[in-house]
Each structure stands twice: as structure tokens, then as C-alpha cells.
Image (cartoon, rainbow, N blue to C red):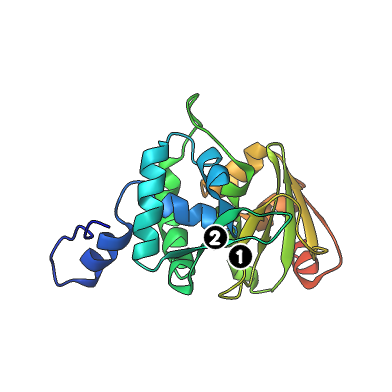
Amino acid sequence: MPPRRSYDQYCSAARALDLVGDRWTLLIVRELLAGPRRYTDLHADLPGVSTDVLASRLKDMERDGLTTRRRLPPPGAATVYELTPRGSALLPVLQALGAWGEPELAARRPTDAVRAHWFALPLLRALAPFSTPGLLQVHLDEGVFHLRTDPEPATPAYGDGPSPTAPDAHLTLDTGTCEAIAQGRLSLPDAVRAGRVTVAGEGPVAKALREV
């Protein structure tokens, strides 16, 4: 493989950007934080990326120790990409970047793609003050996704579709409410109190949300 490009600056921020500063790299991380993904799944959930660029970024990320590949056993029999512990450690980086970018969301543009699980990061930020561990299943107009408020290093922080095990709480809200939370215009507690978020379940996180 060709050598990795570098800013050649003795600075930790520059070294970090050597690894993740290329276009699409952090968005690939965003997708892989949801767990192992096939190449076709990644391409489908990264609208706008070319197949050549996606393949190149995945090779770079594997070379740099951010991702790895493995072959699923039958009947799956597919190759999946997944984050290494080093790659998974980028979750708080994406959280901080998402918080910084909240003012840039504004109204959705006609050309903007959207996937339900992209709202997992802002909802994780909104849930952080509760400090209550749990698995939540979120129901949106665009679809269903799940997230963990206390992901372990080897556990995906969120994922597309229903939760793999019984969730501690179900959250149901419309896309407008979720957008307002993602943009920082509405807090999750205020949304629950206003009836814009319906909370179901008997787990600790569900009880904490109902008691706000």
C-alpha cells in the first residue's frame, strides 16, 4: 500500500488528522460504531461516496489500525468491517464534533440524505446527564434504531433496526422533535414533559426519563 500522507508536524492534533482527516473517514467511523458492516451496507448508508473512495478509505483505516476485516461463518459467509478498540475510541471525538456542529444543522435541505440511526449520536448526548445505563429502542418516522447509554469498548454504541435483546426503554418521537433535540433547540427532558417523546418500559433509564 502507498505510504500514509502526513502533515509532518510534531503535534498530536496533526497526527490525529493524519489518520482521520481525509474526507469520509469519520463518517465511516460513524457507521462502524453501529457494529460490523458489510461493504455494501456501508456504501448504502454513505450516500455520495464513490466505490473507489470508500474502498481506499477502508484500506487506509485498516492499515492504520482503526478497522479490521473478518469473514462471517455460514450462512452469512460475508466479509464485514469493524472498528478496532483504537477506532471505537473515536466515539467521544464524534460526539464533540456533533455538538460543535449543532448550529450548522438548521432546516433540512432538499438534497440532504437521512438515516434513522444518524440521530443516535445527538440522542446519546441528550441522555448523558442521566448517567443511567441502559439499552434503548428509538422509534422515528424514518425507522427504528437502538442505542446504549453505557457502551463497553467492544460493544456497539448504537445500531440500525430493533435492539438485539429486550430494551430497557422504548422512545417514540417524530422526526421534528428529534431534529430539535439534535439542533440543541429542545432538551430531552423538556420534550418528555411536553409529551413530544413517549417513554415506555420499566428499566432504570425509562424510569429516570419519566421522572424528569
In the image: residue 88, left or right of residue 141: left
Query: Is any part of residue 168 visible from this angle?
Result: yes
What is the residue that sits farthest to the top in this orientation?
110
Q: Secondary structure at mark 2?
A: loop
Q: Residue at x 37, y 51 (%)?
A: 57
Amino acid under disc 1: Pro
Asked whether the residues under the numbered discs 1 and 2 touch, taking CB atoms below 8 Å apart as contact, a structural biologist would say: yes
Residue bearing mark 1: 156
- The crowding category of the residue bearing disc 1, from other C-alpha atoms within 10 Å (few below 14, some 14 to 19, many at least 20), is many
User: Where is 31 relative to 48, above or below?
Assistant: below
Of pointers 1 and 2, the one earlier in the residue sequence: 2
In the image: residue 124, left or right of residue 18: right
Q: Position of residue 208 (x, y in %)?
A: 75, 68
Q: Position of residue 108 (x, y in %)?
A: 51, 31
Residue closer to the observer: 120 or 58: 58
Is the C terminus in the top left, top right, bottom left or bottom right quadrant?
bottom right
In the image: residue 63, left or right of residue 131: left
Residue closer to the observer: 47 or 58: 58
Is the N terminus in the top left, top right, bottom left or bottom right quadrant?
bottom left
- Alpha carbon of mark 1 to alpha carbon of mark 2: how far? 6 Å
Amino acid under disc 2: Leu
Q: Position of residue 28 (x, y in %)?
A: 46, 52
Query: Is any part of residue 186 visible from this angle?
Result: no
Q: How many marks?
A: 2
- The crowding category of the residue bearing disc 2, from other C-alpha atoms within 10 Å (few below 14, some 14 to 19, many at least 20), is many
Residue closer to the observer: 41 or 77: 77
Q: Position of residue 197 (x, y in %)?
A: 74, 49
Residue bearing mark 2: 33
Q: Secondary structure at mark 1?
A: loop
